[in-house]
């Protein structure tokens, strides 16, 4: 085989490996039951903030720990330990995506994405129909 064939073969193999790795690493959202069944694996858990429980953030004790409860899409409520300062607007968020692992009796999250309410929904705008 020529050197160009070998280089092209290695290049194609590398691209295929990158493609397969990117497809398998895309995280789909699971519920807490799945995450706690396999505590060593990192998962994405989606849900809403459980407003019946307080959000615990004390910057004098630990500036990078926020504790709260999340209700997943199947309705199960679990305590979450977020390894970051309390995000602004957490209580107003419509949904929350957490990335992390189950650890003991809580979910240890390293990253969090929030969907905040839209300022363009019908509740925020009054339609004047008397014109």
Image (cartoon, rainbow, N blue to C red):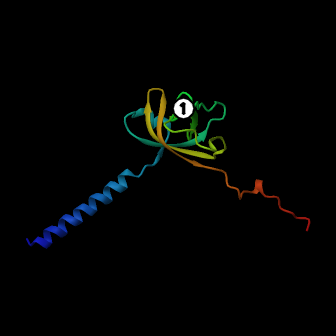
Q: Quadrant of the C terminus?
A: bottom right
Q: Which residue reaches farthest left?
A: 1
Q: Is residue 49 left or right of residue 97?
A: right
Residue at (48%, 38%) from the top-left corner? 109
Q: Is residue 23 left or right of residue 51?
A: left
Q: Which residue reaches farthest right?
A: 130
Residue at (32%, 60%) from the top-left corner? 19
Label 1 sits on residue: 78
Q: Relative to 122, say whether 8 is above or below.
A: below
Q: Is residue 90 left or right of residue 100?
A: right
Which of the 4 image quadrants contains residue 75?
top right
Q: Position of residue 107 (x, y in %)?
A: 48, 33
Which of the 4 image quadrants contains residue 58?
top right
Q: Which residue reaches farthest front?
A: 60
Total labels drawn: 1
Q: Position of residue 84 (x, y in %)?
A: 51, 39
Q: Position of residue 7 (x, y in %)?
A: 16, 68
Residue at (64%, 30%) from the top-left corner? 54
Q: Relative to 120, say whether 76 is above or below.
A: above
Q: Relative to 131, say whether 34 is above or below.
A: above
Q: Nearer the viewer, residue 59 or 32?
A: 59
Local crowd size for mark 1, using a 10 Å CA cut-off: few (<14), some (14–19), many (≥20): some
Residue at (48%, 26%) from the top-left corner? 105
Q: Is residue 53 left or right of residue 62?
A: right
Q: Quadrant of the N terminus?
A: bottom left
| Disc 1 secondary structure class | strand
Q: Nearer the viewer, residue 110 or 24?
A: 110
């Amino acid at each position: 085989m020529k050197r160009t064939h070998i280089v092209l073969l290695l290049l194609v193999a590398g691209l295929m490996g990158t493609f397969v790795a990117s497809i398998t690493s895309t995280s789909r959202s699971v519920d807490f039951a799945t995450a706690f069944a396999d505590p060593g694996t990192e998962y994405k858990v989606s849900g809403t903030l459980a407003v019946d429980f307080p959000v615990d953030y004390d910057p004098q004790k630990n500036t990078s720990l926020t504790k709260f409860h999340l209700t997943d899409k199947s309705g199960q409520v679990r305590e979450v330990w977020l390894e970051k300062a309390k995000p602004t607007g957490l209580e107003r968020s419509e949904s929350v995506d957490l990335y992390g692992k189950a650890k003991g009796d809580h979910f240890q999250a390293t990253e969090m994405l929030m969907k905040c309410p839209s300022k363009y929904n019908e509740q925020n705008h009054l339609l004047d129909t008397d014109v």
